[in-house]
Amino acid sequence: MSTARAGAADVPADPAGPARARIDGGAGPEPIGPAGPPWAAMDAAIRARRSVKAFTDRPVPREVVEELLELAVLAPNHRLTEPWGFLVLGPEAKRALGRVLGRRKARKVADPAAAEAVRAKVEREVLAVPVILAVTCAEAEDPEVRAEDSAATFMAIENLLIAAAARGLGTHLKTGAVMDDPELRAALGVEAGRRIVAQIYLGEPAERPAPRPRTPAAEKTRWLE
C-alpha cells in the first residue's frame, strides 16, 4: 500500500453496519480493546494517541467520521452552549487550505523558484490527507462564556482524537495563526462570530511515532490541605 496521500471522507455508508475499524471495505487498522476492566480500552486509547504525520491512501468511510463527530459533541459544556462546529473538507476545500498554507510557507523562502516548489509541495501534501476537519467555535461577547466555550470545543476535539485512536486511526491536531487567515475563512465559508480554532488530519497511519517523554503527573500536582 502506498503511504500518505490521497482519499476522501465521502465514501458511501457501508450497508453492513458501523465501520468502526474497517477502512475502505478491508480489514483496516486494528481497534484497541485489551482484555481487562471496562476502563482498560479507554486507557489504552489515550496512551496510543500520537500526532501522526504520514497516512496511507486508504479512504476513511463517511460513517466512521460521523461516529467520531457524535462522540466529540458529548464533551463537557457549561451552560450547554454547544459552541463547536465541524467542517469536513472536500477536494475543493482542501485545495483552498493547501493554497493558504503553501502561500504562508513560501513567503519565508527568498528564492522564487524554491518558494514555488515549497508552495506546490504543501498543496500536494494537503490534498493527499484522507480526511481534514476544520473545527470552529462560537465567539461569545461575554469573556467568561468565550473562555468556557473555547475549553469545551477543545474537549470535544480530545474526544474525537481518543475515539479515533481507539479505532486504530491516526490524527494530527493543527493550530496557529493560519486559522485566522481571511482567505481561509472565506474559502471555508466561516461566518462572522465564529473562529476556526483547529484542523484535524485523520486517516490510517502509515507509521506510528514513538511516544515522547512526558513529565509525570506527580511532578505537576500539589495535594492541598
Image (tube, grey):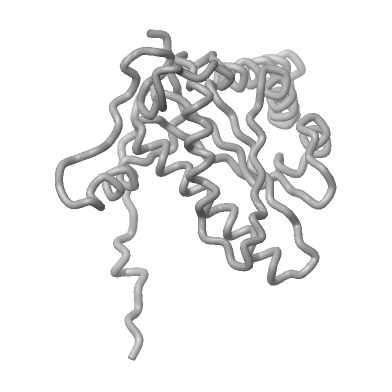
Residue 37 vertical placement versus 88 (above, below): below
Number of numbered discs on residues: 0
Residue 144 vertical placement versus 173 (above, below): below
Residue 181 located left or right of residue 47: right
Q: Is residue 211 visible?
A: yes
Residue 195 located left or right of residue 182: left
Q: Residue at x 54, y 22 (%)?
A: 129
Task: Provide residue 102's location: percent of width, then percent of height.
Answer: 70, 25
Q: Residue furthest left?
A: 36
Tell me the quarter of the image containing the N terminus: top left
Residue 70 located left or right of residue 178: left
- In terms of depth relative to the viewer, which is nearer, 114 or 141? 141
Q: Can residue 110 be seen in this view?
A: no
Quadrant housing residue 101: top right
Tell me the quarter of the image containing the C terminus: bottom left
Task: Provide residue 178's location: percent of width, then percent of height.
Answer: 71, 39
Task: Provide residue 150's location: percent of width, then percent of height.
Answer: 63, 58
Q: Which residue is drawn at 56% across and 36% down?
A: 200
Residue 37 vertical placement versus 145 (above, below): above
- In terms of depth relative to the viewer, which is nearer, 189 or 216? 189
Q: Residue furthest top?
A: 1
Task: Provide residue 87's location: percent of width, then percent of height.
Answer: 66, 35
